[in-house]
Each structure stands twice: as C-alpha cells, then as structure tokens.
Image (cartoon, grey):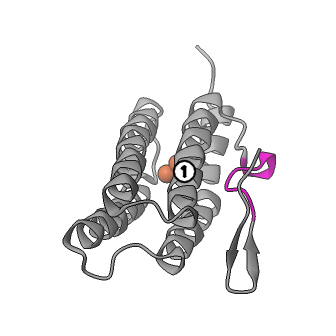
Amino acid sequence: MGLLLFLGETKMAPTWNEAMATGVVEIDGDHRKIAAVFDDVLQSLAENQPREMVIMVLTRLVDALCEHIDHEEALMRSIGYPDTAPHHRDHDQYFSMLSQLVFDCQTGNGGLSQNSLGAVKAWKTKHLETFDRPLAEAIRRRPVG
Ligand SMILES: [Fe+2]
Ligand SMILES: [Fe+2]
C-alpha cells in the first residue's frame, strides 16, 4: 500500500505509479526500487524517526541511485547512445543533490525536510521525462541481433 503524506496542503501521492513505466524492464525495475526506497525516506520523516535512522534510509536511496546510474550508463554505452553526455550530467546533478542532503543530515546543517524531498521528487520526474524516456525509446527501437 502506498504512503500518503501532506506537503502543506498538497497531498503527496505514492512515489511510483505505472504511468512512470518506460517499457524497458531493466530501467523500470530500478526506478521501482528507487521509488520504494524514496517512500521509505518519506515514511521515516513522517514517523519522526531518529536522525540516524533517516540517514540510514537516505544512504540506501543513494546506493540504489548509484547502482541505477551505473546500470543506465552501461545501457547507453551498449547501444552507442548519442545523447549520453547531457544524461550523464543530469545524473551527476541528482547524485550531488542527494549527497548534499545526506551531508546536511549528518552534520545537522538544516537536514532533511519534506520540502527538500519534494525538490528531489520534482527532479526525478523531470529527469524521467527529459532523459530516461528518450533512452528507453532508443533501447526499444534498437535493431535486434
Ligand atoms: Fe537517467
Ligand atoms: Fe533512470
């Protein structure tokens, strides 16, 4: 069952839904996993869990993201994808954003808020539409054999 949170007056829907599917099994599997861990982060915040617990879940999110970035970039290389550089830059930006969140959380410098997670979620959506869908399309259209 998905988690529902409230960001101010805005209801935050569960992170994954089938409309996010790209049709490429490898990519969708990773995205589902990232979304599930993202939900765990939201839940840890909603439950007001201790900082160390939130950091642990957030670290799982960074790990899942690193794994996915490696995976997607290997897919790009394997098909000789022409738009690798901007996609790679956007991955780097996401990784930096999350690493900063972990750092802030660890140092008590502002830390994690539902607003900062909202920004991460907005990035995820934009990245999916701008970079991952075109990549998925290229993978689906590649000649077999
Ligand atoms: Fe991507
Ligand atoms: Fe992706």
Residue nearest the viewer, comparing 143 with 48: 48
**Location of residue 118 by image quarter:** bottom right
- Residue under numbered circle 1: 40
Q: Which quarter of the rendered picture does the N terminus lie within?
A: top right
Measuring from the top left, give residue 23's x and y in whole percent: 72, 37
Q: Magenta stretch: residue 78 in it?
A: no
Quadrant of the rendered image containing residue 27: top right
Is residue 19 shown in magenta?
yes
Q: Residue at x 44, y 57 (%)?
A: 87
Residue type of the residue flagged with mark 1: Asp
Q: Which portion, as a residue range, is magenta? A: 13-20
In front here: 61 or 7? 7
Q: Residue furthest top?
A: 145
Looking at this view, name the residue that lies furthest to the left.
107
The quarter of the displayed image where residue 50 is located: bottom left
102 or 143: nearer the viewer: 102
Q: How many marks?
A: 1
Question: Which secondary structure is most common in the magenta stretch?
Answer: loop
> Image check: 117 left or right of 51?
right
Most foreground residue, 15 or 77: 15
Secondary structure of the residue carrying numbered label 1: helix
Q: Return the x and y of residue 41 as percentages of the image width and height.
A: 50, 56
Picture layout, residue 132 above or below residue 115: above
Q: Classify mark 1 as within 8 Å of ligand 2 or not, answering yes or no.
A: no
The residue at 41%/49% (across/down) is: 57
Quadrant location of the C terminus? top right
Crowdedness near tag 1: few (<14), some (14–19) or many (≥20) residues, C-alpha within 10 Å: some
Residue 49 place in picture, x, y as percent: 45, 60
Q: Residue at coordinates 33% horizontally, 69% vertically from top-left?
A: 101
> Can you give x and y, in whole percent of width and height, for residue 58 in the image?
39, 54
> At x 41% / y 63%, what residue is drawn?
90
Q: Is residue 81 above or below residue 39?
A: above
